[in-house]
Image (cartoon, rainbow, N blue to C red):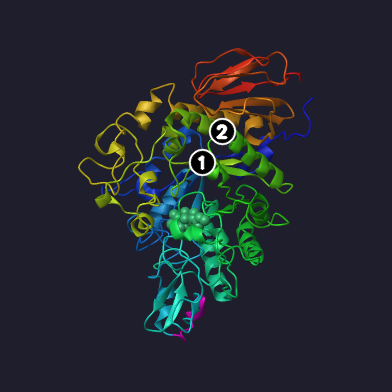
Amino acid sequence: MIENVQTDADSFPWWKRGVIYQIYPRSFQDSNGDGTGDLRGITERLDYLSWLGIDAFWISPFYPSPMADFGYDVSNYRDVDPLFGTLADFDALVEEAHARGLKVVIDFVPNHTSDQHPWFVESRSSRDNPKRDWYVWRDPKPDGSPPNNWLATFGGPAWTLDEATGQYYLHGFLPQQPDLNWRNPEVKEAMLDALRFWLRRGVDGFRFDVAHHIMKDPELRDNPANETPGILHKPMGDFDSQLHVMDRMHADLHPTYQEIRAVIDSFNTETQPRFMIGETHIFEPVQWASLYGEQLNEMHMPANFGLLRAQWNAKSVRAHVDSIEAALPAGAWPNYVLSNHDDWRTATRVGPPQAKVAMMLLLTLRGTPTIYYGEELGMENVEIPPDQEQDPAGLRVPGIGMGRDPERTPMQWDASPNAGFAPEGVTTWLPLAPDYKTRNVAVEKADPKSILNLTNELLELRKSHPALAVGDYAAIDGVPDECFVYTRSTAGQRVLIALNLTNQEHQFTLPYTGTGQVVTSTGKDRTGKISLTFMVLQPNEGILIDITGAKLA
Ligand code: ISL
């Protein structure tokens, strides 16, 4: 008897039942031979995305920008940087994507602008400029030091002194990324209006960059010291010496998110429900879950980065998933991610033999998965020679692995010079991975056992199996500590996912009788019926089994 289950996948909006694919636009496809990817390049590759089977893609920022942080320093919220193309290119991309049934999610950077944004240029021009209060300006302490102890994510204090006006401005990231003052109603209105600009152009949703940063302690009190450094998901240097409780997550985030959500919802139609996901690096599950809003009227989904931080072993991964399921407010929908443009490639983090297991996990958990471009190929971090390093995080805080270039290298399309990413002879903005001739879309499409074909199959299975897309999750107890085994169930269907997170064979008994039907496996070497009473998982193996109708032992 299958109880307490969801049934009809079609009644779920696309952002719940679907899969999001993240495109870092500099690195996806260069259409004009300047060595950097662009919007037309994405349009040229839409057939690939359709074939792959994703539902939506999110494009990291393409706004006009001095590129101090490669687009996360926006100097105009209503245009496209010439490096990436034009507004007309964007409109064409949306039209072509929608024609294929693909949703378009764009990055929105609410916490900070570029220091070259006209708003900041005005704001810094004098203490009594009408835009002064659009940013966070404070006098130095009597000894001339910054107003409080806050640190910038990418090294150094979060305050820079403007010599001309004698005040410090706040920047949670680079000095070239001054923080906006969201408590100023004019700022809020200007930003909401920028959202409307893109909603009118047809975007299906937004990813809100560092959404938890936009509201800080209004009294700007010091952060307390962090007595247990190492709690962040990657080495962050001095930034990790503090608990970031005052420089983010102030309670008035909630009414602000509600106002943003109301604007987005006001563009909903029957056929086009809009959506927002917040980039929220909050790891305490209850605090994270609060960002859905008490009435589920804030973030449709606060991004959940817990899997990036979990140790790669079955106990930690299961503990994380169970904690998310437990913390989730009634009616809210979970989400998972294994890598992005700020974090290590999955194959590098978990080791190449585990990459397929990781992909099977991501695409079979209950919750919307986001796949970072190239993960479907098993791309790895690429070592960047020091003289080619680009990322300001790595350049400003060298030597501890903060640089993000290794996970941002060009997409590997084929074995031709420049991997089909850019024309032959062009110098690409970051070097290509050394393995691109053997690890690319063309080679992997032709290999039935590739991670690309596994990803493609799992994406198709999510469409054909409501249990995988929207079914309930239940972990199975009594299996070896090295394996993570769970079911996904709808009223009419139950599938079981058995993942071996080690390179050793494991044997165990499942709490079901009889046999199940193999749907697929990471090795693509299993077919037919499989015993549920005695299961053997090969090293680094994941199996997906249809157990609809199986009886509990
Ligand atoms: O603060 C952190 C850890 O607690 C960082 O992980 C931080 O949240 C993360 O670096 C934020 O990233 C986003 O905003 C940055 C940009 O450089 C990143 O690429 C973007 O994803 C500034 O806009």
- Residue 273 is labelled as none
Query: Which quadrant would residue 70 be assigned to in this image?
Result: bottom left
Amino acid type assigned to the residue bearing label 1 in the image: Leu
Asked whether residue 197 is drawn in magenta, I would say no
Report the quarter where the C terminus lies: top right
- Within 8 Å: ligand 1 and the Cβ of disc 2? no
SS for tag 2? Answer: helix
Q: Residue at x 39, y 49 (%)?
A: 401
Q: Position of residue 388 (x, y in %)?
A: 26, 50
Q: Note whether 41 is above or below 239 in the view shown.
A: above
Amino acid type assigned to the residue bearing label 2 in the image: Leu
Instruction: Residue under label 2, please give it.
Output: 361
Query: Which quadrant would residue 72 be assigned to in this image?
Result: bottom left
Which residue lies most toward the bottom here?
128
Q: Nearer the viewer, residue 15 or 154?
A: 154
SS for tag 1? Answer: loop
Q: Position of residue 299 (x, y in %)?
A: 62, 55
Q: State yes or no: discs 1 and 2 in contact (Cβ < 8 Å).
A: yes
| Disc 2 residue crowd, few under 14, some 14–19, many 20+, Cα 10 Å | many
Q: Note whether 427 is above or below 109 in the view shown.
A: above
Q: Position of residue 421 (x, y in %)?
A: 31, 41
Per the rendered image, the range of residues in magenta is 127-134
Instruction: Residue under label 1, please give it.
Output: 338
Earlier-in-chain disc, 1 versus 2: 1
How far apart marks 1 and 2 lie (CA) works out to 10 Å
Which secondary structure is most common in the magenta stretch?
loop
Which residue lies most toward the front here?
227
Asked whether residue 128 is drawn in magenta, I would say yes
- Within 8 Å: ligand 1 and the Cβ of disc 1? no
| Disc 1 residue crowd, few under 14, some 14–19, many 20+, Cα 10 Å | many
